[in-house]
Amino acid sequence: MTTLTTKVTPYANEAFTNFALEDNVKAMQAAIAKVKGELGLEYPLYIGAEKVMTEAKITSINPGNVDEIIGYVSKADQALAEKAMNVALETFESWKKVPARERAEYLFKAAALMRERKHEFSALMILESGKNYVEADVDTAEAIDFIEFYAREMIRLSQINETQPLVRIPGENNQISYIPLGVGVVIPPWNFPLAICVGMTVSAVVSGNTVLLKPASTTPVIAHKFVALMEEVGLPAGVINFIPGSGAEVGDYLTTHPKTRFISFTGSKEIGLRINRLAADVAPGQIWIKRVIAEMGGKDGIVVDETADLDGAAAAIVASAFGFQGQKCSAGSRAIIVESVYDEVVEKVVAYTNRLQSGLPELNFAAGPVIDKTSYERILDYIEVGKSEGTLLVGGGKAEGNGYYIQPTVFGDVSGKARLMQEEIFGPVLAIAKAANWQEAIAMYNDTEFGLTGSYFSTDEERIAEALETVHCGNLYINRKCTGALVGVHPFGGFNMSGTDSKAGGYDYLMLLTQAKMTSRKV
Ligand SMILES: NC(=O)c1ccc[n+]([C@@H]2O[C@H](COP(=O)([O-])OP(=O)(O)OC[C@H]3O[C@@H](n4cnc5c(N)ncnc54)[C@H](O)[C@@H]3O)[C@@H](O)[C@H]2O)c1
Ligand SMILES: N[C@@H](CCC=O)C(=O)O
């Protein structure tokens, strides 16, 4: 039991750190130095109260300096995953009875502690995932936001009978309550290694579920740091079980497990579809239909018409394409520009891209490495494809450094059907296409199997009104970049092959992790 000491104030987004101020840069450098002093440690699995060190380990390295080892993280196999499942099932029986306000209190305490150690969390991401200062700071701020937001959301959901009473009829007292589902498998990606991992996990546990958290294998140390924080604030053992491991081995085992009640996944289309398919089969002994929340990839884009603020549009295109080296599901990897202003916008995009300098994230270069060798090779292959599909305008190959550095790369005159315009590259590669007019530009934007984020740049109100209706994506922005959704402000999730359109950071998110029970009592 935890004491309820937090005064619940209205939700507000965590402020970002201003790195134009020298003091803030120094504070981040100090945090990086501190984290560097702790590199190379070994980390255990968390299975209930037990910390299990396995012989097999995941070695986490710095993608910006591949000789630097971040840590060695224990690796679960199927037997350990089974053990964790049993602990999670047992813990669920007590955790589900903990009142919502008390569950939320653990989150409030965790948010406060993470805020205190904000730069330390960011510094670890700078080293483990290759984020620059701003990108890492935004990631930590978003993690704090998710914790604060979902804690309040659970309190709201638990009070729904008072705030949104059912239609009253004489002679009955009717109530609705949102009760937890059971044991969930939480599978986050590496690209928001703190924010998404934290958001997916705390939303599930504050709703009264217990979880098996399988972090991405490239960023397990930051995931461990979060799990350790939850332990520090006194979250009962067994609520979050930490089981890093192979997606194919542990992931498939738990996806098909009869006791898995739900799977909360964020990652690629391919793995999301696999999980969805495997989870649909009913295993012997299974008594429910598994719930699958699958947030997947994107082929996001920015449309610019001839009435737009062209400089603003070009800056937004570059920020959306190259923030965190294009490794965001929201990355604007396509730009579709109306013919009459095409040359002008492209010239500006090229100029802005040329300003991005590649180098070590810990020295805060704008363009850092991509996450690992597999991504590096895949992206370089796409660049070769691009050379035959368009005109190379900037970059086009490897960048200097002892890591997975790729030059921010821009191709022009790419056709709407080209692979570069259709496939998610998840790297620093931007494809630009020309459209005859704004209607054709929107049609080209919509010609994709994905539907996650998009932006439309225009000053024409009638066109904007039409774009708001016709541009088909889960997060549509007007006259701003297509990355950078804020928790509670821009609930985030996409259509079609971008996933199940669950809105992370939205008011209905916890309904995905609960089931509604109606009780009716004769009075
Ligand atoms: N829509 C969103 O909100 C969102 C947010 C972030 C990232 N993404 C997408 O994520 C992708 C990049 O992340 P990634 O490379 O980590 O994706 P990925 O699909 O390779 O891996 C995601 C997670 O799934 C695990 N996994 C792999 N095989 C598995 C299996 N068979 N069963 C269960 N789990 C398995 C991985 O270990 C990892 O933890 C991109 O496509 C990006 O667009 C989407
Ligand atoms: N929510 C983030 C993207 C998350 C996926 O990578 C954004 O809006 O940029």
Image (cartoon, helix red, strand yellow):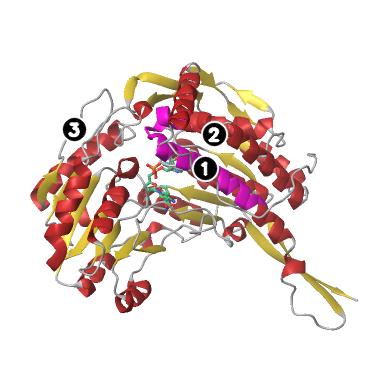
Q: Position of residue 280 (x, y in %)?
A: 49, 57
| Residue 113 within the segment the image draws in magenta | no
Kindly identify the amino acid type of the residue bearing the numbered disc 1: Ala
The residue at the point 41 percent across, 34 percent down is: 133
Q: Residues within 10 Å of mark 2 (few under 14, many from 20)?
A: many
Kindly identify the amino acid type of the residue bearing the numbered disc 3: Lys
In the rendered structure, the answer to whether residue 9 lies left or right of residue 277 reads right
Q: Which badge, 3 or 2, comes first in the chain's sequence?
A: 2
Secondary structure under the numbered disc 3 in the rendered image: loop
Residue 401's place in the image compared with 356, above or below, is: above
Tell me the residue that label 3 is attached to.
398
What is the distance, in whole Å, between disc 1 and disc 2 at their CAs? Answer: 8 Å
Q: Which badge, 1 or 2, comes first in the chain's sequence?
A: 2
Residue 298: give its label.
none
Q: Main secondary structure of the magenta part?
A: helix
Q: Position of residue 58 (x, y in %)?
A: 44, 25
Residue 141: give its label.
1
Q: Quadrant of the C terminus?
A: bottom right
Residue 175: quadrant of the picture: bottom right
Kindly identify the amino acid type of the residue bearing the numbered disc 2: Lys
In the rendered structure, the answer to whether residue 208 lies left or right of residue 393 reads right
Tag in front: 3 or 1: 1
Give the image quadrant in which the ligand numbered 1 is located.
Answer: top left
Tell me the residue that label 2 is attached to.
118
Do the CB atoms of the residues marked 3 and 1 lie less than 8 Å apart? no
Secondary structure under the numbered disc 1 in the rendered image: helix
Q: Which badge, 3 or 1, comes first in the chain's sequence?
A: 1
Do the CB atoms of the residues marked 3 and 2 lie less than 8 Å apart? no
Please give the range of residues in magenta: 123-151
